[in-house]
Image (cartoon, grey):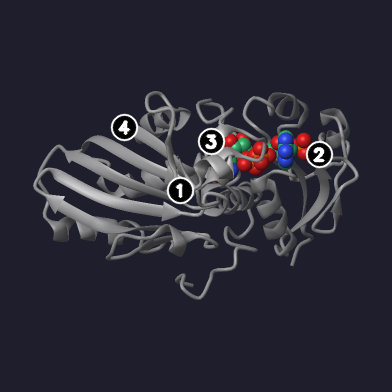
Amino acid sequence: MSAPKRIGLVGARGFVGQELLTLLDADETCVVDVVVSQGAPGRTLAGHTLVDLSPSTLVARALDGVVLGLQNGQSAAWVQALGSDVVVVDLSADWRFDPMWRYGLVEKERARLQGSKRIANPGCYSTAAQLALLPFHDIVDRAHVFGISGYSGAGSSPSKRNDAALLHDNLMPYDLIGHTQEKEMRAQAGVDVRFLPHVASFFRGISCTIAVDLKQSVSLAEAGDRLRSRYQHDPLVRVVDEEPLVKDAVGRHSVQIGGLRVDGKRLVVVATLDNLLKGAASQALQNLHLGLGLPELAGIALTPKEPS
Ligand SMILES: NC(=O)c1ccc[n+]([C@@H]2O[C@H](COP(=O)([O-])OP(=O)(O)OC[C@H]3O[C@@H](n4cnc5c(N)ncnc54)[C@H](OP(=O)(O)O)[C@@H]3O)[C@@H](O)[C@H]2O)c1
């Protein structure tokens, strides 16, 4: 086996960064060389001491890959400093619309992600909704995506959307027109998507109920065939018969897609995932591996319920 690739993680203190650190530590193809934190240097996280480095100091570590897990709008200085030979996977929305970057929806873009040096990891709702829509891409006229997220989706800086007391026994709609991930889904899926996001009182997990107007009628059997055949070789997409539940997605690396219903030109499908795993860290690791030419699922342990 060749030497493990040397990885830097910037923004490890956040919800996603912590998940990624755990995954990378179990990944024999990679070794975590440096874990950067500007807000809490000196703190220990999963046995790694966080350090406060500048982008130019990070470059001197001669890393093979860097994952940026910072909040939106904070990645530019790091990206500019890192050489074009370093694989950079960014978790924020900063580069998802940039044509110079590859959009890392792995099950759609796998071939083009191989060897890519700049990969924008998709949003969590966007991953769930786009994977559910992909098998029907040629016949979708318009889709309404009703999304509910656990409050870890809002990150760790205190806000209304991760205020556990306010969310207790509650459901909070937000950004009902023009959410960044509505734009992301429209741009990537190339169809008219109306996205209705909500935050709920559970910590992690996402459910997207997707109501689609089709350009032509399909039967339930045809729609089911499209869904199953599209993902027959994708271990991180599980097609199920019943409507998938959030609690069954939590702690898993995969998206669950099911509850398919069809009435002529009207189709409804439900997708659930763990926003911190397939919605963020697991997909970032898939992307890092593809960029570095490593086995895509290294370090991503499939649970017994997931197909191996
Ligand atoms: N959460 C999700 O479900 C999810 C899903 C997909 C994509 N994303 C994207 O991935 C990126 C990281 O998301 P995240 O949820 O991990 O964000 P986060 O919890 O807010 O953490 C991001 C960084 O913010 C800094 N930070 C500021 N205040 C903090 C605090 N009180 N506690 C911990 N860290 C704090 C830390 O950097 P320093 O240590 O350097 O200060 C931390 O690494 C974001 O761009 C987000 O949009 C998130």
- Determine which residue is flagged by label 1: 169
The disc labelled 2 sits on which kind of residue? Ser
The kind of secondary structure element at disc 4 is strand
Q: Residues within 10 Å of mark 1 (few under 14, many from 20)?
A: few
Going from N to C along the chain, the mark reached first, 2 or 3, is: 2
- Determine which residue is flagged by label 3: 102
238 relative position to 63: left or right: left
Alpha carbons under labels 2 and 3: distance apart: 26 Å
- Determine which residue is flagged by label 4: 193
Camera-side mark, 2 or 3: 2
Looking at the image, do the residues carrying marks 3 and 4 touch, with CB atoms under 8 Å apart?
A: no
Alpha carbons under labels 3 and 4: distance apart: 21 Å
Task: Indicate which disc residue 37 carries.
Answer: 2
The kind of secondary structure element at disc 3 is strand
Residue 191 spot, x, y in % from top left: 29, 31
The disc labelled 1 sits on which kind of residue? Asp
Alpha carbons under labels 4 and 1: distance apart: 29 Å
| Residue 266 to residue 175: above or below | below
